[in-house]
């Protein structure tokens, strides 16, 4: 069976495009966003978070003034493309309109409205493997302003509640020089019980704890994983050892609060002249996984990673 495409109405996201093969299902919003709002093995639940209530963003006045609109920005959930470094309100361009798209082969190319106020044109192409759960997501950002812009593609996957994330730490021997970075945001408490760090890994649990937590690292192994509901979501990406990255030079960030877990990878910072663009790929897969691990035991984490991810 090759990849099958169909137009559906999905919950309160409106018109969506469903992509499916014998292994997995992907749903992409085209009335809003775009978002890859659904990803999961056939017969299993969605491993991505769906913001049905639209209640995860409330600070509106500055956004309305900047964009000269009464529209609000909504997280919606799922996977989206932004640019880094983050700023408010610029990053929060409302994206509540229909998204032109093109289906070709096993891919759908999504071309939302230009982000005129910030001078960016975003496109996202989602390609599904014919026979497995593997998905490639290509992200491009073009400078449509009349001046230079420095940015990095920032690819955010909002995962469903209740799971545990694993992030590898750099273990290469750099002699007298440092080999790891751990960057914390002002609201992050390093004693947070959801957070665990050891020499080879970081784990982060999503719980009902309200306080937000975020950390960024130099993820040179090029993967992050999230175990939830009997499915293991693995996000892979390339790392440029000579590249400049945002946020004190980290290429992987993760954020959690009581609603979500965000699994985020970043491309290199690029200075784009008018008309130039940058692109960045992620490579996904989701596996059935009934195994678990002790997220505060380095040996247990390592055994799980070697069995299911490496």
Image (cartoon, rainbow, N blue to C red):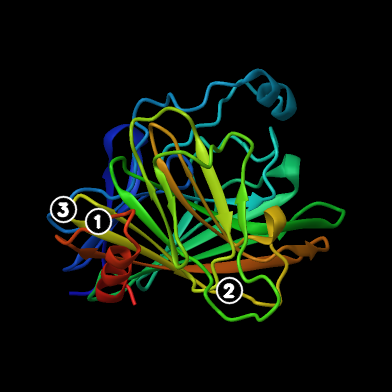
Work out whether residue 78 can be spotted.
Answer: no
Numbered disc 1: secondary structure: strand
Which quadrant of the figure has residue 272? bottom right
Tell me where residue 218 appears, x and y as whole percent: 59, 65
> Who comes first in sequence, dot 3 or dot 2?
3
Question: Could you tell which of marks 1 and 2 lies nearer the N-terminus?
Answer: 1
Q: Secondary structure at mark 3?
A: loop
Q: Is residue 19 left or right of residue 250?
A: left
Residue 215 can be seen, yes or no: yes
CB atoms at circles 1 and 3 under 8 Å apart?
Answer: yes
Q: Nearer the viewer, residue 46 or 250?
A: 250
Which percent across, then down, holds residue 226? 33, 56
CA–CA distance between discs 1 and 2? 26 Å
| Residue occupied by mark 1 | 40
Dot 2: element: loop
* Residue at the spot of label 3: 44
In the picture, the disc for residue 239 is: 2
Tell me if residue 226 comes above or below residue 207 in the rendering: below
Residue depicted at x 54% and y 67%: 219
Which quadrant does the C terminus fall into? Answer: bottom left
Give whichever of 305, 197 is nearer the camera. Answer: 197
In this rendering, would 200 be left or right of 310? right
Mark 3, other Cα within 10 Å: few <14 / some 14–19 / many ≥20: some
Where 144 sits versus 267, above or below?
Answer: above
Label 3 and label 2: CA atoms lie apart by: 31 Å
Q: Are marks 1 and 2 in contact (CB under 8 Å)?
A: no
Residue at x-position 17% and y-position 74%: 1
Whole-angstrom CA distance, mark 1 to mark 3, is 6 Å
Q: Where is residue 180 shown, x and y percent of the image? A: 60, 66
Q: Nearer the viewer, residue 21 or 223?
A: 223
Q: Which residue lies most toward the front here? A: 176
């Amino acid at each position: 069976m090759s990849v099958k495409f169909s137009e559906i109405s999905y919950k309160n996201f409106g018109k969506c495009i469903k992509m499916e093969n014998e292994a997995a299902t992907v749903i992409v919003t085209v009335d809003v966003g775009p978002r890859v709002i659904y990803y999961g093995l056939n017969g299993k639940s969605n491993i991505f978070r769906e913001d049905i209530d639209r209640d995860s963003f409330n600070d509106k006045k500055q956004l309305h003034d900047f964009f000269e609109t009464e529209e609000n920005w909504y997280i919606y959930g799922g996977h989206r493309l932004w640019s880094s470094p983050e700023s408010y309100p610029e990053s929060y361009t409302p994206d509540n309109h229909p998204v032109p798209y093109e289906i070709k082969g096993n891919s759908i190319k999504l071309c939302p409205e230009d982000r005129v106020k910030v001078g960016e044109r975003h496109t996202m192409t989602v390609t599904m493997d014919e026979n497995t759960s593997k998905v490639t997501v290509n992200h491009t950002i073009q400078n449509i302003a009349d001046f230079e812009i420095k940015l990095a593609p920032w690819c955010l996957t909002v995962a469903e509640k209740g799971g545990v994330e694993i992030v590898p730490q750099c273990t290469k021997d750099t002699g007298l020089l440092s080999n790891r970075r751990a960057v914390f945001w002002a609201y992050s408490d390093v004693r947070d019980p959801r957070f665990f760090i050891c020499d080879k890994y970081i784990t982060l649990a999503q719980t009902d704890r309200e306080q937000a937590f975020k950390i960024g690292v130099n993820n040179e192994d090029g993967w992050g994983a999230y175990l939830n509901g009997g499915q293991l979501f693995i996000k892979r990406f390339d790392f440029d050892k000579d590249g400049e990255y945002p946020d004190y030079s980290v290429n992987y960030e993760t954020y959690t609060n009581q609603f979500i877990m965000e699994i985020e990878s970043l491309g290199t910072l690029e200075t784009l002249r008018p008309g130039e663009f940058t692109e960045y790929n992620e490579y996904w897969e989701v596996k059935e996984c009934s195994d678990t691990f002790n997220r505060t035991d380095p040996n247990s984490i390592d055994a799980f990673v070697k069995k299911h991810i490496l």
